[in-house]
Image: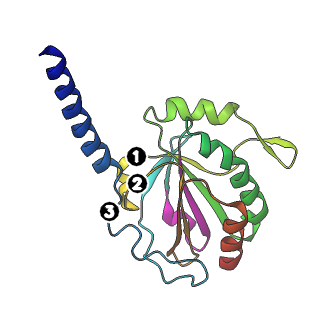
Amino acid sequence: MKKTLLIIGTVVALIIGTYFADRATRLSTKSTSNIVKADNPGTGEAAPEFTLKDLDGKNVSLSDYKGKVVLVNFWATWCEPCQVEIPWLIELQQKYGPKGFVVLGISMDDEGKSVVAPWVGKERFDVNGKQEPMSYPILIGNDAAADKFGGLFGYPTSILISRGGKQVKRITGIISPDEITKEIESLL
């Protein structure tokens, strides 16, 4: 009898846990409905405005980058796929930054700046044989910022924004360096 109750209790707990996990990670229907590929730039949904703190405690808004091509990258220090793509993001920033491109890293670590700032300060990444720090702006994110982009299904999630402020591509999961390079070049 005790075993049966334990099994039933476990099944009910799993069902409830699955339900809430599904709700927490579900994308809203508006999040990707108007986002288009970069081969037709400027016709996607307008990028939402947000203001977040950088690692120095200063307010940074998306509007600060008006007129630039922006890759908003939601990531976390504990996320292995995020760490795999960081060297590519550093390289993209170095290569295209002078042409009006910026990677905007938004850390989604629950602990915030107390974890992110030391991690960013000490970590180095192999970029073309050199050990490089993260050379693009890092902001401390929150659920409200993620919700403005329709929520996140997982990390990393990147949204490419045209010079005109339109969302032209959304990538959930690790980016393809070749594909994102072509997309960026088509917008510069």
Identify the mark at residue 146; answer none if there is no mark.
2
Is 90 in front, or is 183?
183
Is 126 in front, or is 23?
23
Q: Secondary structure at mark 1?
A: loop
Q: Residues within 10 Å of mark 1 (few under 14, many from 20)?
A: some
Instruction: Find residue 159 and report its horizontal and vertical position in percent.
Output: 53, 63
Identify the mark at residue 142; answer none if there is no mark.
1
Residue 20 found in image quarter = top left
Residue 70 relative to residue 23: left or right: right
The residue range painted magenta reads 61-75
At 66% across and 66% down in the image, what residue appears? 180
State which quarter of the image contains the C terminus: bottom right
At 57% across and 85% down in the image, what residue appears? 40
Q: Relative to residue 140, is residue 157 depicted above or below? A: below
Query: Which mark is first along the chain, 2 or 3?
Result: 3
Q: Tell me the kind of residue under disc 1.
A: Asn
Cα separation between marks 3 and 2: 11 Å
Residue 179 found in image quarter = bottom right
Residue position marked by numbered label 3 in the rendering: 28
Q: Nearer the viewer, mark 3 or mark 2?
A: 3
Q: Residues within 10 Å of mark 2 (few under 14, many from 20)?
A: some
Determine contact: label 1, label 2, CB under 8 Å. yes
Q: Relative to residue 118, is residue 149 depicted above or below? A: below
State which quarter of the image contains the N terminus: top left
Q: Tell me the kind of residue under disc 3.
A: Ser
